[in-house]
Image (tube, rainbow, N blue to C red):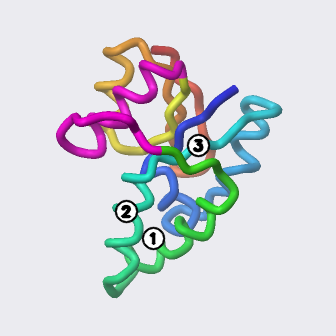
Amino acid sequence: MRVLLDTNALLMPAQFGVDLYSELLALFGDFEPITLEEVVGELSGLARGRGRDAAAARVGLALVRRSTVVPSGSTAEGVDNRVIEYARREGCTVVTNDRELRNALLREGVDVVSMRRQKTLELLRG
């Protein structure tokens, strides 16, 4: 099972205390975490700042080391559109807590893993 982690997913461990990889292991058993280069770029930009979001981004960058980083291969505007295009093309499930992205993915028929009650992750079928 290939699981695409978006920027928001990689912020969740620091923001909500969710053990992202343990939760995904509980949902899928064996899985392959994937992160787009563009997501790493977003995290790097956030990490240069100050405050909670910057600290969460630094944690997210540390978590990226446990995933395969790939180019999106897309020319679509914006990282969210590249996530959608990549997930559709490659048949990945996407982990995100971004409501707009989640809804767009579900409309496209892409499965999404999202937070439930700020504690655990749940699978939503697209």
The x and y percentages for residue 99 are: 32, 38
The x and y percentages for residue 102 are: 37, 32
Residue furthest toward the right? 29
Q: Which residue is mark 2?
A: 41
Q: Which residue is mark 3?
A: 34
What residue is at 55 percent from the left and 27 percent from the top? 93
Number of other residues with Cα within 10 Å of mark 2, as a class: few under 14, some 14 to 19, many 20 or more: some
Label 1 to label 3, Cα distance in Å? 17 Å
**Quadrant (top left, top right, bottom left, bottom right) of the N terminus:** top right
Instruction: Confirm whether residue 58 shows in the render.
Output: yes
Q: Amino acid at mark 3?
A: Ile
Whether pointer 2 and pointer 1 mark residues with C-beta atoms closer than 8 Å, the reply is: no
Q: Earlier in the sequence, mark 1 or mark 3?
A: 3
| In front: label 1 or label 3 | 3
Q: Amino acid at mark 1?
A: Ala
Q: Earlier in the sequence, mark 3 or mark 2?
A: 3
Q: Which residue is mark 1?
A: 57
Q: Is residue 30 above or below residue 19?
A: above
Label 3 to label 2, Cα distance in Å? 14 Å
Query: Which residue is at the front of the view, 24 or 1?
Result: 1
Query: Which residue is at the front of the view, 96 or 35?
Result: 35
What residue is at 45 percent from the left and 26 percent from the top? 87
| In front: label 2 or label 1 | 2
Residue range highlighted in magenta: 71-91
Number of other residues with Cα within 10 Å of mark 1, as a class: few under 14, some 14 to 19, many 20 or more: many
